[in-house]
């Protein structure tokens, strides 16, 4: 769902208090250096104005209508829809779990991409990562900034590239 005016963290906290599962991809940013020379880092949403909500449309509509804190939530329509039954964007659970497996790791090995970038449209080899922090994640090898990277994508919504995965940890997936 889209959240207006950068209120992703506040909405996440409200929904979690109400027992609604959410996922907000966060990334660690190098912040400032204090007077003693100590560097500080802060977490902020990796994808602005976006939060993933695991709930039915009826439950979300009820929250938006009766809970003032949920008013900033906005539905995202499905650009790939050809019927009235699936006009709201819904991410399949398997695809969402794969994205969460990768995006929940908060370090410098992740690079968030524009989900509409041209290089995401090019075909690539599907792989599964067999070891490390990203074990069991599935993605596509793409060439980004002159390097091969494993990209995990929610088509048209979000994409994250893993900057380095040893080749021995990659297992081709037959389609």
Image: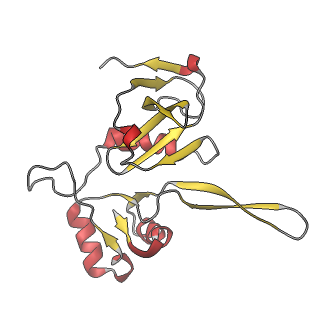
- In the image, residue 56 lies at what x, y percent? 24, 59
Nearer to us in this view, 175 or 11: 175
Nearer to us in this view, 58 or 121: 121
Residue at 91% over, 67% down = 36
Relative side of 73 to 78, left or right: right
The correct choice, above or below, for 160 with respect to 39 in the image is: above
Residue at 54% over, 37% down = 145
Q: Residue furthest right?
A: 36
Residue at 27% over, 61% down = 76
Q: Quadrant of residue 74?
A: bottom left
Residue at 45% over, 25% down = 128
Nearer to us in this view, 111 or 76: 111
Quarter of the image for the C terminus: give it. top left
Q: Quadrant of residue 173?
A: top left
- In the image, residue 95 lies at what x, y percent? 35, 40
The correct choice, above or below, for 98 with respect to 88 in the image is: above
Nearer to us in this view, 91 or 118: 118
- In the image, residue 97 lies at what x, y percent? 40, 42
Relative side of 141 to 80, left or right: right
Q: Identify the coloring.
A: secondary structure
- In the image, residue 17 lies at what x, y percent? 45, 69
Quarter of the image for the N terminus: give it. bottom left
């Amino acid at each position: 769902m889209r959240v207006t005016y950068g209120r992703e963290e506040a909405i996440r906290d409200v929904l979690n208090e109400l027992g609604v599962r959410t996922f907000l991809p966060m990334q660690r940013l190098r912040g400032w250096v204090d007077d003693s020379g100590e560097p500080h880092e802060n977490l902020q949403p990796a994808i602005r104005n976006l939060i993933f909500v695991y709930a039915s449309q009826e439950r979300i509509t009820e929250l938006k209508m009766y809970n003032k804190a949920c008013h900033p939530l906005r539905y995202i329509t499905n650009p790939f829809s050809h019927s009235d039954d699936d006009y709201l964007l819904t991410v399949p659970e398997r695809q969402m779990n794969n994205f969460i497996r990768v995006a929940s790791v908060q370090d410098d090995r992740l690079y968030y991409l524009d989900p509409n970038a041209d290089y995401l449209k090019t075909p690539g080899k599907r792989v599964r990562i067999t070891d490390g922090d990203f074990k069991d994640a599935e993605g596509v090898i793409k060439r980004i900034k002159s390097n091969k990277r494993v990209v995990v994508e929610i088509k048209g919504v979000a994409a994250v590239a893993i900057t380095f995965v040893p080749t021995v940890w990659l297992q081709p997936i037959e389609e």
